[in-house]
Amino acid sequence: MFRQASRLLARTAASRRSRAFSSDVPATPAQDSNFIESWTKVIPNLDPPKTPSSFMTPRPATPSSIPSKLTVNFVLPYASELSGKEVDMVIVPATTGQMGVLPGHVPTIAELKPGILSVHEGNDVTKYFLSSGFALIHANSVADIIAIEAVPVDHLDPALVQKGLADFTQKLSSASTDLEKAEAQIGVDVHSAMNSAITG
């Protein structure tokens, strides 16, 4: 039994090593000529179906050298805060901790937690408070940041943040169901992060 397990593990490890990285895959989608030929034999009067990649623009090529700037797209469900803006660096509040993104960063997808997004452009730093979202960093030095809610840190009202924190802390202590506890805990987490953004 152990001999078979070691062979299976060796086989899966070898297959994983032979799989191409996403940056090695060609930017333009390849047509499957065998499928198209078979399709035209069986159903000659209909065009072959299109795959999702047929509707997408090809991925830009990975640059051979690291660019000097990072291109940032920062969007909300109702607005686009930054579109194609070239900056020196962004710092995102990932669930694993603060993550600095510079030009040439390794491709990454990071879940965002409530916290501060810092956009560094020369000596200017613009800070936004994010509720949650995702950051997608691409191999071509483009960062797409998608947030549910965001507001510039200087627009936060300290008195309202303190009041909200007190209200949700009280709701958390008096919650009787799991749903009430979860909702109150989210409120406490968001207001604590806003309080840290204001004071920090």
Image: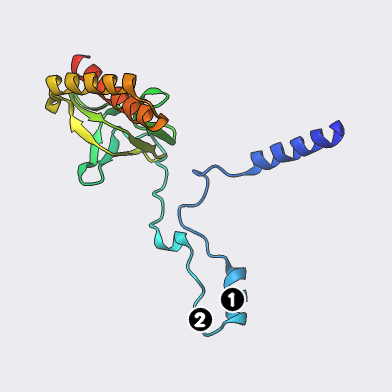
Q: Is residue 89 above or below residue 81?
A: above
Along the polypeptide, which appears first: circle 2 or circle 1? 1
Hey, which quadrant is residue 189 in on the image?
A: top left
Q: Of the numbered discs in the image, which one, if any, rests on residue 39?
A: 1
Residue at 41% across, 29% down: 178
Instruction: Report the residue at 50% width, 52% height from top.
Output: 26
Image mark for residue 183: none
The answer to which quarter of the image holds residue 43 is: bottom right
Residue 151 image point, x, y percent: 19, 32
Q: What percent of the width, then of the height, locates residue 101?
A: 35, 28
Identify the amino acid type marked 1.
Trp
- Residue 46 marker: 2
Q: State the residue at coordinates (25%, 17%).
A: 196
Can residue 44 be seen? yes
Tell which of 64 and 161 is nearer to you. Answer: 161
The CA span between labels 2 and 1 is 9 Å
